[in-house]
Amino acid sequence: MVGIVIVSHSQKLAQGVQELAQQMVGGAGKCAIAAGIDDPENPFGTDVMQVYQAIDSVYSDDGVVVFMDLGSAVMSAEMALEFLAEEQRKNVILCEAPLVEGAIAAIVQAATGANLEQVLAEARGALAAKTLSLVEMAIAQVSPHDALSIPSSGNQELPREIHLTVQNQMGLHARPAAKFVTIASRFQSKVTLKNLTNNSDAVNAKSINQVVTLGVRNGNKIAIAASGLDADEVLAALQELVEANFGEEVGERETILGQNSIAPEPVKNKGEKIQNCLFGIPASPGVAIGKVTLYQPAFLTVEQQKTENPQAEWQQLQTAISTARHQIQILRNQISATAGEEEAAIFDAHLLCLEDPVLIQRTRQLIFEDTFIAAAAWKTVIDETVASYEAMSDLYLKARAGDVSDVGQRVLRSLVGTVPTTLDLQEPAIVLATDLTPSETAQLDVTKVLGICTVLGGANSHSGILARSLNIPAVLGVGAELLSLENGALIAMDGETGQIWLQPDEQQLNELQIKRDEGLATVQALKTVAQQPAITRDGNQIKVMANILTVGDAKNSLENGAEGVGLLRSEFLYMERLIAPSEEEQLEVYQAIASTLSPHPLIIRALDIGGDKPIYYLNLPQEANPFLGWRGIRSLLDFPDILKTQLRAILRASYQHPIKLMFPMVSSAREIRAAKEILATAKTELRTEGIQFNESLEVGIMIEVPAAVVMADKLATEVDFFSIGTNDLSQYVMASDRTNPKVANLADAFEPAVLRMIQQTAIAAHKANIWVGVCGELASSPLATPILVGLGVDELSMNSSAIPAVKAVISELTMEEAQAIAYAVLELDSAEAVKNYLAAR
Ligand code: PEP
Ligand code: MG
C-alpha cells in the first residue's frame, strides 16, 4: 500500500487531518505524521529528522507521498529525502497538493490499493471542485482598499500585484523583514517583492536576505506580486502587515542585537535615572575607566577543498544547520526571558537566515554541481551574502552583515569545530559583549581587560563569578542599551554599584580615579597579611580555600593566601571542544594543579553540566527549565563512560597528592550510591591494571538543592564531607533563575531562608561527624563571614581575590561574637535586613 506522510508546523493540525482521513477508511490507511517541534514554548515548526523517520515508518516499494503545509515544511521534507537511500528516494514523492484536501484524497485512494500514480493523480485533483466553485467568490471578495492593486484577471496562475508604501520608521529592517518573510513563507504561492522607489529587480519574498538587501526604507513604495492558488490570501496578509507598520509603534527604532552589530543610535539612559548613566547588576567590584571594545568571537577560515561525496557533505551541512538552529533558539529564549520578547525577535531573523531558500539553494548548487565541501560552500555563500549587505550605503543595513556573518560562523563552528575565542586587545580596554560564555571570560587577558559590561547575565552567572575570581570589575545584565555604545568610546564603570558613566565629566573621573586607586592599594596590603592562617581571636582556625579552574588560578590563589582548593570546577575542561577530554589529558591537568598547590589539598568536583553550562558534543536536549532539568549528577549518571573516565583520572591523580572528590547537584542518597558504584568500578579496574591511587580517597557532595538540606542527616552517612553551593541553593530556595537579571537579585544568599538552610546542613554534618564547607559565592563575601563562622562552617572556599578580606574579618572575630551575629540574623526577615544589620555593626 502507498504510504502517506503529513508534514505540518502544527501537531494538532496534522493529527486532525490524519484522524479525519483514517475515519473515512476505517483505519485502513498507512499514514504517518511529522509535525511540530520539541519546544514547549514555541511548538510550531518542522524537523528534518522527524520527517525522515515518518517516511521510513510507512515506506515500502509501493511508494510514499508526502504532503506539506507551509514554507519550511517543504524544505524539511526536501532535506529529509537526502537521508534516504538512492533507490528509496525515487519512490518518495513530495506532492504540491494542498495539505488537507490532498492528504485526505490520497489516504482514501491508497486504502483502495491504488498505485503511486493513481494516488498522486487523486491528490492533485483534490482541489479542483472547490476551486471552481469558490474562485468567483474569491475575486469578488478583494478588499475595497486595494485601490492600488492591479486587478486580477481571474486566472489564479497569473501574478497578482499590489503596490504599497512602507510607513514604519526603519523600513524593512531585520525584525519587520523577518515578519514579512515569515508570513510570505506560510503560503504556497510564489511571492516576489520589488522596491519601486529605487527601481530594484523583483526578489524572492521568502528569502530574508533578499528582502533585507532590497534596502526598503521609510516612505519607499513596494510592489508585492504573488502567483498561485493562495495568491489573494498571501497578498491580503502582507498588505495587512505593511499597513499595520509591522506592529511597530510610530517613531520606534530598531535595536540591532547580535555579537557583531551595533546600532549607531544616540545613547539612551536605561530607566532615565541619571543623565548619561546606565545601570546593571554589580557583579565584580572595582572601578574601571577606559575606552570600550566590542567583543567579537574568533573568526573561522575554511579551505576551498573539493569532495568526492557531495551527498555526505550535504548531510553534514543539514546537521550543522540543525545544531545552529538549536543554539539560536536557546539564545532567543534566554533573551526573551531576560531582555524581553521585542529584543528576542531579532533572533527570528537569524533563524530565517538558516532557512533562506535562496541561500540554501546556492549552497546546494556549490556542493552538488561544483563539488565544494560543505564548509567551503557555506562559507562562500555567506561571504557573498555578507558582501551584498556591506555594499549597501545605508548604515543600518551594513550592520546587518554582522548578523549574517554571526549566523554563518555559528554553522561553520558546527562543521569544522570550535576554535578558542580570543579577545586580541591591543591596549587596555573595557570589554562590551552581548554575553560572555564562561570559557570566553576565562580566556580574557587580565592585564588588558579593565572591566566587563554585558547585556545579559547576573552576579551569579558564571561570567560574573569568573570576573570576580579574575579581579576584573564587571557590570552585567545591563540590557540592550549597552550595544548602542560606539567602539572606542570612553566610559567609566563601578562594579560595586553597577553604574556605568557614558561620558564621564572631569569631576566624576577624578572621584572615580581616587576610588579605583584606593581599592587597588587596599587589595595589595591585604594580600600580604593573607599569607597567615585565618584564626579567630579566641584561637579557632577556619580553613580558607579557593575556587579555581586552571593551573594559573591555582598559582594566583596561593598568592592571595589560599590554603588549598575547595572547588575545582572541572566542567571547564570539557567545554568549547569537540570531544570529551581523555583520561590522560585530565590526569595531566589534575596532577599539574595538585603539584602547584602541594602540600595543600585539592577538591575536584565531578563534571557539573547543564543549566548555564552547555556541552555541545553531549547533545543535551533543549529544556524548558534547564535549572530544574537534566543537570549535575543527574545527567552525569546517564553518561557513565564519561564519568568513569573522569573518576579514573581523579583516582590516578590522587596517588601521592591530597585530592578529594565531590559530586554536584545531589538531591538524593540514591544518586550518591549510584555514583559511588561507578567509583568502585573505576577502582577495581585500576587495581586490576596495577595502577596506583589513594584507596581511601575522600568523597563529598555539594549541598545545593533544598531536598539535600532536608535530608542532610541521611546523606551525611554516605559521604566524608559536605560543601554548600549557595549559588544554586539560593536560586532553588528562592525559586529564581540566577542567570535571569529580572529575578537574579531575588536569589540572594543573604536571605534568612538560605541562611537557615546553611544552619540546618551544618548541624546535620556535625552530628554525623563530617566537616562542612561553603563554596558558593556567599563564602566570598566578607560581610557574610561572621555568619558562616558563627553557624559552624569549617571551611570557606571562594574566589581567590576575596581571600585576603575574608581572612582579615576572621582574625578580628571571636567564636562567641560570630555565633551571636549568626543567631541574630537568622531571626530577621529579609536579605536587606540582614545586610543592614551587618553593615551597622
Ligand atoms: C554553587 O551552586 O554554589 C556552586 C558552587 O556551584 P556552581 O556555581 O558551579 O553551580
Ligand atoms: Mg552549583
Image (cartoon, rainbow, N blue to C red):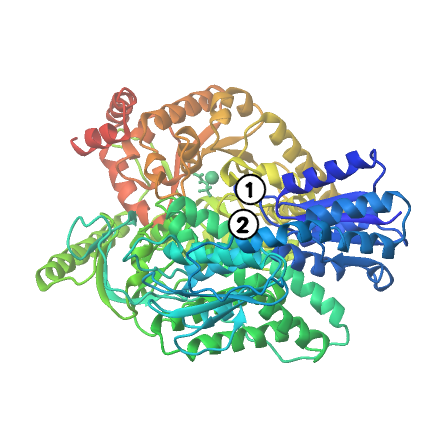
Closer to us: 255 or 841: 255
Extreme residue toward the left, this view = 507
Provide residue 135's location: percent of width, then percent of height. 62, 54
Q: Which residue is mark 2?
A: 614
Q: Write the residue at 48% across / 58% down.
A: 238
Residue 441 is at least partly visible in this image: no
Assign a secondary structure to mark 1: loop
Query: Is the C terminus in the top left, top right, bottom left or bottom right quadrant?
Result: top left
Provide residue 688's location: percent of width, then percent of height. 77, 44
Q: Residues within 10 Å of mark 1 (few under 14, many from 20)?
A: some
Q: Which residue is mark 1?
A: 623
Q: Is residue 679 positioned above or below 559 on the image? A: above
Q: Quadrant of residue 683?
A: top right
Provide residue 651's location: percent of width, then percent of height. 62, 45
Residue 27 is at least partly visible in this image: yes
Provide residue 97's location: percent of width, then percent of height. 72, 55
The residue type indicated by label 2 comes to: Pro
